[in-house]
Amino acid sequence: MAQTPQQGAHSRAPLIGRLDKYDEVEDIRNYVERLNLYFQANDIAQEKKTAVLLSAVGPTVYKTAKSLAEPTPVTEKTYTELCELLIAHYGPKRLVVSERFRFYKRDQQPSETIAQYAMTLQNLASTCKFGQFLDDALRDRLVCGLTSNNIQKHLLTKDGLTFKAAVDLAKILETAVKDLREFKNSPNADTVSVHALHRNAKQPYKQPYKPSFKQPPPQTRAKPQQGGKRCSRCGRDPSHQSCPASGQKCNYCQKLGHFSVVCRAKPKKLHTVQHDPTDSDDGDTETNDFFVGTVHHTSHDILNGDVWRQPIKVQGQMVQFLLDTGSEVNILPANVYKSLKLSDKTLQPTTLRLHGYFGGKAKPLGQKKLSCEMKNRQYSLVFQILASGQPVIGKTACEALGLIQRVYTMVNRDNVFEGTGCLEGPPVNIKITDSATPYCVTAPRRIPLPLLPQLKQELEKMETQGIVKRITEPTEWCAPIVIVPKKNNQIRLCVDLRQLNKAVQRERFTIPSLEEVLGKIVGAQVFSLLDAKHGFWQIPLASDSQKLTTFITPFGRFCFTRLPFGITSAPELYQRIMCDLLVNLDGVVVYIDDILITGRTQAEHDQRVHRVVQILQKAGLRLNKEKSKFSQFIQTRQLMTVMISQQKLQHT
């Protein structure tokens, strides 16, 4: 049976979506895109699009459209013509140079996540007309604009990295950093380190990660004030302008908005031992676990002749103590404590739970303040009483008793910190495969006009230092450049050597593992870390290899005369050269452009530093004074914690 007109009207499918009037705050191009999607979803005929547009934009925009269409009536304009009129009127006037300048100046903000930063870059790039260079531009700006140096360094080691891969990897590393920071900043965990705890010989030893010396020592956590208010979401001072736990997932209950350290779903630990207020200053009865950064991992290490021991009178009885500058507490085993002449041997309760890095754990039986005598002077020290072990005097007590002291020395070798050095000896070669297909760019990439003067200045500086030289002869290889503004209003010149890297033959020289590093720093007390100034740029490049590094700029073509950054074989070449220079030196570890020098005593350390600096100076190499650290009295546990923590992030 045929439908009536009324029936046909009722059977029409409902419209999908809705049209809002145009708000001038919105980009007119986005509005037109949404309008086209609406037409497509509802199968709007072409001849009706003009009428629908004029009906939807609102009275103010309709009046403007009539004025723009004069002298032709606005209803006689086609849909395409009408869109062009509105875009020309309401669309922002954009200059590509200005848009790219905004794009290249955009760095990640302190409170901005990786995902938010990546989305912002994509929005900025949409008006930059990068074309086929879009993915490279997004990736380069992302890597150079990150606030985290660790994530940035990790991304710089990846070859063939795309923008999407860079974002995904950066987000994973960002999550790992937050988790590590949450653990380190836990307000319920006070850190007490004991160097002398050791691993049982039967305990399995897990394969560690490779070390890196760039990471700075972890900062000391501030203990929360007793009785003070704390944020219920992050556990920190509530005076923070923005809570770091906002939007973060709890590792315990998996809910959003708080950290696991303050999670209410976690079971509470109660310590039922009552404190004697006359003997203890600490009224907190909650049992806490304490992490120890590093320790000797065999008892043989503690008993050998390299460690320091000192007899000290405790309650009138002579006790042989191990001087352990890696420990933050003093320790007495129970058998020694029982032998002391005390009228009251009752222990005060303690909340400390000691952990060694290699798995050694100890829960003190209690603590006791004891009278000690050293060189006819009286001291009062607090000792943690353990069921077994050996007597230990920690770092603070060692300093108070005058058993250790810091000695500062100065070395007059200022010229080793001046300028950029050049290694004496034969230049290195960049070897490529015989089947390699040359890659040559004939035109430079467009550089934002405001950055051109800085680029010219940087090229002149590198040419004056002998890092690069101008080249006019034809070359089979020629790479483009990318200019990245730095936060100090300077620029970084990056040569895109990805195509050359596909043909480079690497030497596969071994970078030291953590076991090799540990073998050289066991028992060390004093450390120095030397940083080579522009390390790769101090290695001369053979003339044939120089042409492979040719790059093109708006000011002509140049090539490197020194080993450039960005070549996949550069770290291994540099590692081999430095190892050859410093071969057979005890207590010296080379990790690419970092040189770690250790010593069990200040004199031994200084002798090794002088020898290394002398060798580097004779070889023509230069050091970075600002980044080098001399005579650092950090503990072995702190150094290893830094190395291991950073490598766990790098391998996440």
Image (cartoon, rainbow, N blue to C red):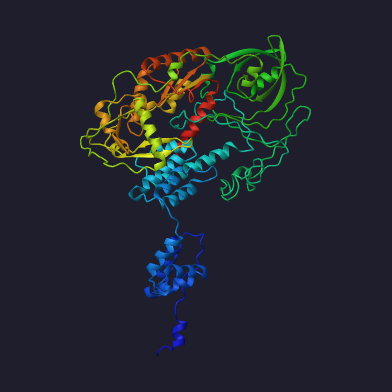
Q: Quadrant of residue 510?
A: top left
Residue 621 versus residue 546 in the image, above or below: above
**Horizontal arrangement in the rendering, residue 292 relative to residue 414 (left or right):** right
Residue farthest along the left direction in this orientation: 434
**Front-most of 115 and 405?**
115
**Horizontal arrangement in the rendering, residue 418 relative to residue 393 (left or right):** left
- Dividing the image into 4 quarters, which one contains the N terminus? bottom left
Q: Say if residue 509 shows up in the picture.
A: no
What x and y, as percent, mark residue 613?
Answer: 43, 16
**Front-most of 637 and 14?**
14
**Horizontal arrangement in the rendering, residue 643 relative to residue 569 (left or right):** right
Residue farthest along the front direction in this orientation: 71
What x and y, as percent, mark residue 481?
Answer: 34, 39
| Count of labels in the image | 0
**Front-most of 191 and 612?**
612
Q: Residue at x 70, y 42 (%)?
A: 229
What x and y, as percent, mark residue 512?
Answer: 40, 26
Q: Say if residue 192 shows up in the picture.
A: yes
What x and y, as percent, mark residue 310?
Answer: 61, 13
**Front-most of 215 and 463?**
463
- Dividing the image into 4 quarters, which one contains the C terminus? top left
Residue farthest along the right direction in this orientation: 278
Q: Residue at x 49, y 49 (%)?
A: 116
Residue farthest along the top direction in this orientation: 376
